[in-house]
Image (spheres, rainbow, N blue to C red):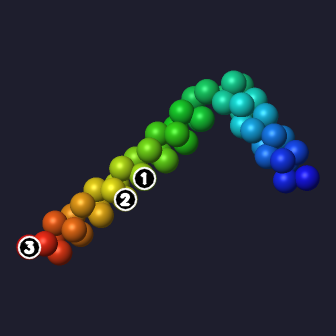
Amino acid sequence: MKKAVGWILLILLIFYVGTNPGPAADIARGLGDGIAEAFNNIGVFLRNLAS
């Protein structure tokens, strides 16, 4: 059951990206920016911790 739900979600994601590439790109950019900011903040924390 979980495998079927996973495949359905993957197919819907591919369909969404194929039919709406602009908003999908914005979502991907936002996720990438969030991940980059998180790693940047971890670096700042560790740098301040070492000082």
Q: Secondary structure at mark 1?
A: helix
Q: Which mark, by number, is residue 34?
A: 1
Three-letter amino acid code of the residue under disc 1: Gly
Are there few (<14), some (14-19), or many (20+) residues within 10 Å of tag 2? few
Q: Residue 3: x and y, percent?
A: 84, 47
Q: Secondary structure at mark 2?
A: helix
Query: Which of labels 2 and 3 is toward the front?
Result: 3
Three-letter amino acid code of the residue under disc 3: Ser
Q: Are marks 2 and 1 in contact (CB under 8 Å)?
A: yes
Q: Is residue 37 above or below residue 18?
A: below
Q: Earlier in the sequence, mark 1 or mark 3?
A: 1
Gap between marks 2 and 3, in whole Å? Answer: 20 Å
Q: Which mark, by number, is residue 48?
A: none
- Of residues 18 and 9, the one drawn nearer to the viewer in this rendering: 9
Q: Which mark, by number, is residue 51?
A: 3
Residue lying furthest left in this view? 51
Q: Secondary structure at mark 3?
A: loop
Question: What residue is rendered at 52% in x and 40% in y?
Answer: 28
Question: What residue is rendered at 71% in x and 31% in y?
Answer: 14
Residue 46 as seen in the image, left or right of residue 5: left
Question: What residue is rendered at 28% in x and 56% in y?
Answer: 40
Are there few (<14), some (14-19), or many (20+) residues within 10 Å of tag 3? few
Gap between marks 1 and 3, in whole Å? Answer: 26 Å
Q: Earlier in the sequence, mark 2 or mark 3?
A: 2
Q: Is residue 30 above or below residue 51?
A: above
Q: Residue 20: x and y, percent?
A: 66, 28
Q: Which residue is mark 2?
A: 38
Quarter occupied by residue 7? top right
